[in-house]
Image (tube, helix red, strand yellow):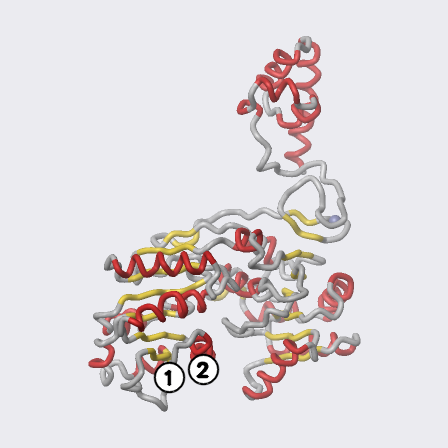
Amino acid sequence: MLRPYQAQNAAEILALIERGVRGVLYHLATAGGKTLTISAGVIRVVVDHGWPVVFLVHRRELLHQSVRALAKVGIKASVVDPDHDPDPLALVHVCSIDTLKARKKRLAGWLRTIRLVVIDEAHHTVAPGWQALLEEMVNAKRVGVTATPYRGDGKPLGALFDEVVRGPSVAELTDAGWLCPAEVWAPWNPDTSGVAISRGDFAAADLDRLMNNDKITRMAMNAYAARMPGEPTIAFCVSVAHARRVAELFSAGGWRATSVDGEMSDDDRDAAIRGLASGYYQVLTSCQLISEGTDLPVVSGAILLRPTKSVLLFIQQVGRVLRVCHGKIRSCILDLSGNVELHGLPEADRVWTLESGLVPQVHRTIRCPKCHRRFAPGPFCPSCRHEFRYWDRPAVPLLSTLADSMIRNMPVADLERIATSEMDLRRIALVRGFNPGWVHHATRRMRERLNERRRA
Ligand SMILES: [Zn+2]
């Protein structure tokens, strides 16, 4: 069953295809149910019309996972991989991009019969070779699907798509109860000023020197014990050695922890991930992403130990814990990487366009000095109620926009608080009947306040 927004998004995509649009990019937040929307809402409909469909994935591990996802909504798909050519009897083919690129010439005739190509995790389409392959499918409409419709450095995806269908934002999905609200705690921030930059992100060797440090891991363990003891958690590390060391320390601290990495067999890795899902493990550490699309709704914690300049990587990391699950009322993000300060809260509204990619914005947060909660600027810490005297008040109206009736009824202290000029204060005095002496003193108070806020 599709959720209301999924049904609506699927209808929008089909309407664009029907109108003759060549490429549609569908943007939906991580854990919003992109694959379900596309398989049940789009692929099933075009298959009923007899359209041959290619479902493209960029990594081989995702082939069988995608076949299973399609089977769940009653679509039988065959796999095209190094060992299997396209099944002539099948309508839906799950293909790895590398296989199709390698056999582009030999499969040219078949590629021309395809009417719809779905590109899963479409933010990878900028890689060379995609364009040429997609152009071989001359009769196919394209639907790209992604939670991050730009490259890691925020640049646009290129010329493969013409129209965009936007699903609800993380904040909207959370408000509607489709995603779990996230609390962010920032016990510590690394100093990344001396870390070298390589290919747009922090250099791996420098990160290992900075973050593979038992003191930092112990801070993470203290925060884990304080905020979410025993809850299923993924720790994102900078290297295999770091991931192993973090798991070792958590185990020594009495938690059931293990690490996964590319050097393990698939079976061992799957067993570790299943162990986290079943509750056997409490903490799973890894230096790669627990693969895109890995669905572990039960995980309620993320420990961020890998600083990154890539907004895409950051969103994928925090997106892991936002899925709703029975009994899970909130998720917890322990940030020792500085990533939330750099990129904003998981629910920050990021503006992007097809032409220019991510629009640069500052997603400001503040950190509570008492309990280390990191949150959107406000007068109180949402956890310990610690009061902040000076903060940016983006939601506070300008005095000039207030009607006289409001100025008559609001407490004078609140009016003074939002006044930013002597003219504002004169208007308050006029409406409330205060004498010029009040304006004089209020002006002095306002200047002090503005100066103090500037210093803070
Ligand atoms: Zn606090």
- Label 1: state its secondary structure: strand
130 vs 27: above or below: below
- Quadrant in which residue 204 is drawn: bottom right
Q: CB of residue at label 1: within 8 Å of ligand 1? A: no
**Residue shown at 42% from the left, 68% from the top:** 121
Q: Describe residue 107's horizontal placement relative to residue 197 as left or right.
A: left
Q: CB of residue at label 2: within 8 Å of ligand 1? A: no
- Label 2: state its secondary structure: helix
* Rendered location of residue 127, percent (x, y): 36, 70
**Viewer can see residue 210:** no
> Quick check: marks 1 and 2 in contact, CB under 8 Å?
yes
Query: Which residue in the protein does label 2 denote?
Result: 64
**Residue shown at 48% from the left, 51% from the top:** 350
Q: Quadrant of the C terminus?
A: top right
179 vs 229: above or below: above
Q: Which mark is residue 79?
A: 1
* Rendered location of residue 95, percent (x, y): 36, 79
Give 286 or 173, whichever is nearer the viewer: 173
Give 281 or 246, whichever is nearer the viewer: 281
Looking at numbered disc 2 in the image, what kind of residue is underneath it?
His
* Rendered location of residue 253, percent (x, y): 79, 74
- Which mark is first along the chain, 2 or 1? 2
**Residue shown at 56% from the left, 23% from the top:** 402
Give 431 or 1, whichever is nearer the viewer: 1
What is the spatial separation of the Cα atoms under label 1 and label 2, in whole angstroms?
Answer: 8 Å
Q: Describe residue 190's horizontal placement relative to residue 27 as left or right.
A: right
Q: Describe residue 195's horizontal placement relative to residue 251 as left or right.
A: left
Label 1 packing within 10 angstroms: few (<14), some (14-19), many (20+): many
**Viewer can see residue 190:** yes
Label 2 packing within 10 angstroms: few (<14), some (14-19), many (20+): some
Q: How many marks?
A: 2
